Image: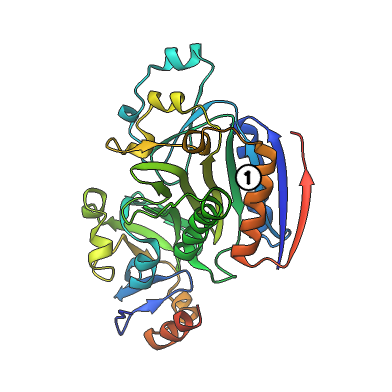
C-alpha cells in the first residue's frame, strides 16, 4: 500500500496536506484501489463553506458512486479542474490528485486525524 | 449479523426509491440492521450520475407512449432498463463498519449470480474486468450500479430472468454499445417463477455475505 509521510489521514480514506492555513484534500491510494477505475469526479464549488463530515464531492468508479466527506472544516478556495476531464489521474497518482483546497476554519480538527503510521495500521485491520 | 429482507412485489421505481432513502438514513443512524429490498418494477429506464442522454435511443414521447418511465438517479453507471421478470435488489448494507469494502461487496453480488447460474442452470458465467456485472460471453445478465453514502450502500443490482429483452433496444445498456443483454429465459428457452427466483437470490445473498440470521417481510407500498 502506497503512503505519504507528513499527511493527515481520515478513517473515510481521505488525505489532507496542510500548507500554512490551506489544506489540500484527496482520497488515498487504498481508496482508489477499492473503487477501481474512476470514471467521474464531482468537485465542490469554490467559496463553499463545509463543516467537517459534509459531503465534499462524489468519486464514481466502475463499481459505485461514492460520496467523499471533508475531514476538516473550511471554505473551498480552489478545485482541481484537471480531475473533471481526467478522473483516472486519481488511479494513477492518488496522493498527487487533490480534489479541493480549503482555507481551514478550525485547525484543531487536524488532531483527530491519523498519521501515516496509524493509517497503515487502520488499513491493515480492514 | 442479521439481514432484513423486504419483498415489495411489483412496485414503481420512485416508490421503491423513497423507501431506499428512508432505510438508508435509518441504517446510517444504526437504527436498523442491514436490509435487502427485493422488487419487480414496471418498465422504467433509469439514468446514473453521469449517464449520457445519447444512450437513450428512443424519444421521450415514444417511451411515454409505450408506458416506459424515465428517471434520473444518483447511482453509479450509465443507462439501464428495469421491467417485469427481472430480480431487482437494493442492498442497504453498512460496508464501512463491517469492513467489507466496496470492491468485495461488488464481487460478492457478482458471485451470487455466477453461482446461481452454475448450480441451478449449469450455465458458465463470468466477470469482465472492464465492466462490472455478470456476463455470458458478450451479453450481460446481471447489471450493478451502487451508491455509497456514509458507508452505507444503496441502489443495487438487476438480474434478467424473464425480462422482455426487446425493451433494451430503446437504450445503449450501461453505455456499452458493442455488447448485448441476455436472460435466463433466453438462455434456457423456459420462463421461471420470479418469486421463486427472488427467494433463491436471497438465499445466496445470505450465504455469500455470511449473514447468520434472516428476517423476511412482505411489504405492499
Residue B66 in sight here = yes
> Could you tell me which chain the residue with mark 1 belongs to?
B
Q: Please tell me whether residue B200 is drawn above or below residue B184 in the rendered image.
A: below
Q: Is residue B29 left or right of residue B71?
A: right
Q: Residue at x 43, y 51 (%)?
A: B125
Picture quarter containing residue A98? bottom left
Picture quarter containing residue B59? top left
x, y percent for residue B148: 50, 55
Q: Residue at x 46, y 47 (%)?
A: B145
Q: Residue at x 50, y 82 (%)?
A: A125
Position of the C terminus of chain B by quadrant: top right
Q: Is residue B89 left or right of residue A56?
A: right
| Closer to us: B63 or B48 | B63
Task: Name the residue carrying label 1.
Answer: B20
| Closer to us: B51 or B126 | B126
Q: Please tell me whether residue A36 is drawn above or below residue B85 in the rendered image.
A: below
x, y percent for residue B75: 47, 45
The crowding category of the residue bearing disc 1, from other C-alpha atoms within 10 Å (few below 14, some 14 to 19, many at least 20), is many
x, y percent for residue A26: 34, 66
Q: Please tell me whether residue B220 is drawn above or below residue B56 in the rendered image.
A: below
x, y percent for residue A1: 33, 80
| Closer to us: B64 or B182 | B182
The number of discs equals: 1
Residue A54 in sight here = no
Circle 1 — which element? helix
Amino acid at each position: 500500500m502506497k503512503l505519504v509521510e507528513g499527511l493527515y489521514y481520515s478513517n473515510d480514506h481521505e488525505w489532507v496536506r496542510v500548507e500554512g492555513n490551506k489544506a489540500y484534500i484527496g482520497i488515498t491510494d487504498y481508496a482508489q484501489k477499492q473503487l477501481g477505475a474512476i470514471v467521474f469526479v464531482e468537485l465542490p464549488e469554490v467559496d463553499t463553506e463545509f463543516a467537517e463530515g459534509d459531503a465534499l464531492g462524489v468519486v464514481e468508479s466502475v463499481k459505485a458512486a461514492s460520496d467523499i466527506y471533508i475531514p476538516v472544516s473550511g471554505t473551498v478556495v480552489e478545485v482541481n479542474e484537471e480531475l473533471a476531464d481526467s478522473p483516472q489521474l486519481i488511479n494513477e497518482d492518488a496522493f498527487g490528485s487533490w480534489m479541493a483546497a480549503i482555507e481551514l476554519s478550525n485547525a484543531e480538527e487536524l488532531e483527530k486525524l491519523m498519521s501515516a503510521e496509524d493509517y497503515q495500521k487502520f488499513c491493515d485491520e480492514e | 449479523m442479521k439481514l432484513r429482507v423486504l419483498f415489495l412485489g411489483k412496485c414503481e421505481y420512485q416508490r421503491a426509491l423513497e423507501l431506499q432513502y428512508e432505510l438508508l438514513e435509518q441504517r446510517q443512524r444504526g437504527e436498523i440492521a442491514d436490509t435487502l429490498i427485493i422488487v419487480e418494477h414496471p418498465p422504467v429506464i433509469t439514468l446514473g450520475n453521469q449517464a449520457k442522454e445519447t444512450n437513450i435511443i428512443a424519444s421521450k414521447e415514444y417511451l411515454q407512449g409505450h408506458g416506459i418511465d424515465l428517471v434520473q438517479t444518483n447511482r453509479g453507471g450509465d443507462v439501464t432498463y428495469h421491467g417485469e421478470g427481472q430480480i431487482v435488489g437494493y442492498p442497504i448494507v453498512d460496508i464501512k463498519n463491517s469492513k467489507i469494502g466496496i470492491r468485495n461487496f461488488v464481487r460478492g453480488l457478482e458471485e451470487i449470480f455466477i453461482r446461481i447460474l452454475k448450480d441451478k442452470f449449469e450455465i458458465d458465467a463470468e466477470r469482465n474486468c472492464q465492466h462490472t456485472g455478470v456476463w455470458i460471453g458478450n451479453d450481460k445478465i446481471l447489471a450493478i450500479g451502487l451508491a455509497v453514502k456514509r458507508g452505507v450502500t444503496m441502489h443495487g443490482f438487476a438480474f434478467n430472468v424473464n425480462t422482455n429483452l426487446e425493451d433494451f433496444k430503446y437504450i445503449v445498456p450501461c453505455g456499452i454499445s458493442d455488447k448485448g443483454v441476455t436472460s435466463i429465459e433466453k438462455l434456457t428457452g423456459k420462463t421461471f417463477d420470479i418469486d421463486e427466483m427472488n427467494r433463491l437470490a436471497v438465499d445466496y445473498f445470505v450465504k455469500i455475505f455470511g449473514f447468520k440470521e434472516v428476517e423476511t417481510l412482505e411489504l405492499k407500498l
